[in-house]
Image (cartoon, rainbow, N blue to C red):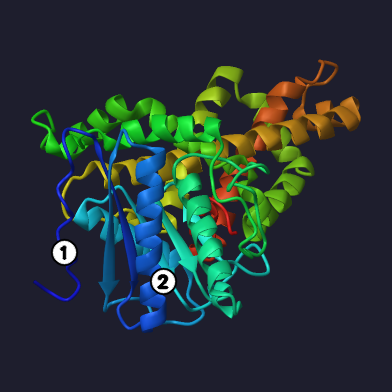
Amino acid sequence: MSENTPPNPPESPGSLPPVTIGFVFDGGESPEVQQRVAWLRDTLLRSLQRDFPEFAWSIRLMPRRDFPQDLPLDPLELLEFGSDIKIEYGLDFLLVFSSMPLKARFDQTVSGVPSNMLETGVVTLSRLLENSDSEVIDRAMLALCRHILGHLWGLDHNEDSVMRPREFWSGDEPLDWSVEEKKDIGAYLQNIADPRLEETSVAATSVWRFYIQVLFREGVVLARDILLFRSWLMMLHLGRFTAATAVSIIFLFLSAEAWEMGAAIRSGWLDLILILVLLAATLSLYFGQNLQGVGRSDRMMEQAVRSRIVLFGTLLVGMVSFWINLFIVSLGVIYLLPDGVLAGWAGLGDQPLPMVHFAKLMATFGILASSLGGNLEEEHDLKAVLVYTEET
């Protein structure tokens, strides 16, 4: 057995559906940090067994010698590192722990980053260990981990429970989920605890059939996960993406050739072009930013396929949402500009200007520009926008 191979988990009692969580940390961490992670494992395990007795819980401590060492630690790198381990060992969820500070992308500081998409979270004990009170540190660790697990299990923020958003975890926050949240967690975990597709006798041997089986088997859950990421806010975090689109839209509005082309394209053809452009733009970003590398696996596994489907679906929904925003903006601008000037540019003479048609045209060309601008973004920045559930 290699030093990176964790011990086998205990057998699940009875016929309860199993849920397994991995706790990954640097094998070179100090004894204090390792003891605190072990204490957290035992405490969290008891609380989960109490709150959700319908599942057979297992939490595995997994020290690693190949833990990333570049400082400050990049949560995105740790999420991908943890996701690969989760898939390799067939775990349901995984938390990556470190005593080193994390790189913050969207906030001033960060203590934890959950990724519902990867079913993986990152926790730093750096700021927590600055407190001199051991009991406060323990409470803050427990609250932070339950908060991150809550996000991995589909929960949103709630001021009256452990899901309360915090900038600093001080140990005075609530430690428990609400009654309604526990019901939601139970329903979410019931789907996760079912046997994975590759463990059944009906699993397809070809890649495309396996993907189709996962879509039919988990379609509702996948759709819920995709919508959970609020990908319509994606452009707020991507400066080059938004700038390329804005500049292109301005040039299109000032170009008579664009209006002439719009007049020559029939509405039905424009709808078909729109669908093709949305798919092409999504594929361009997906492969241009190497997003296909998320959820790597040497063999067909439901977890890896789920991650890829959710990632691609989130990106597609983001592009569709962005197109809707561009359409609304374009429609407003066309409404405000003189009809006679625009109709003249389009070569329509005295005919009324079809505002909806031209707004669709401008938004569609804007999406083409946005895919170019998206590929100008730093690869890790775009990936973080898609993968992070939040920084806390």
Residue shown at 77%/23% (left/top)? Answer: 355
Report the disc number at residue 7. 1
Q: Amino acid at mark 1?
A: Pro
The reply to whether residue 384 is in sight is no
Quarter of image, res 56 = top left
Q: Which residue is mark 2?
A: 36
The residue closer to the viewer here, 183 or 49, is 49
Q: Is residue 104 left or right of residue 121?
A: right
Res 233 → quadrant: top right
Front tag of 2 and 1: 2
In the rendered image, the residue lying farthest to the top is 351
- Of 263 and 369, which appears nearest the observer? 369
Compared across the picture, whether 46 is left or right of 6 comes to right
Q: Is residue 332 left or right of residue 62?
A: right
The earlier-in-sequence mark between 2 and 1 is 1
Q: Quadrant of the C terminus?
A: bottom right
Query: What residue sits 49% from the left and 79% below the top?
Result: 100
**Amino acid type for the residue under numbered disc 2:** Arg
Disc 1, SS = loop
Disc 2 packing (10 Å; few <14; some 14–19; many ≥20)? some
Location of residue 111 with respect to 163 vertically, above or below: below
Question: How far apart, in angstroms, are the residues tagged by discs 2 and 1?
Answer: 19 Å
Residue at x 32%, y 29% (from the top left corner) = 218
Q: In terms of secondary structure, where does tag 2 sit? A: helix
- Counting from the top left corner in percent of width and height, residue 298 is at 17, 55
Q: Residue at x 31, y 33 (%)?
A: 54
Q: Left or right: where does residue 80 sit relative to residue 64?
A: right
Could you tell me if residue 163 is visible in this image? yes
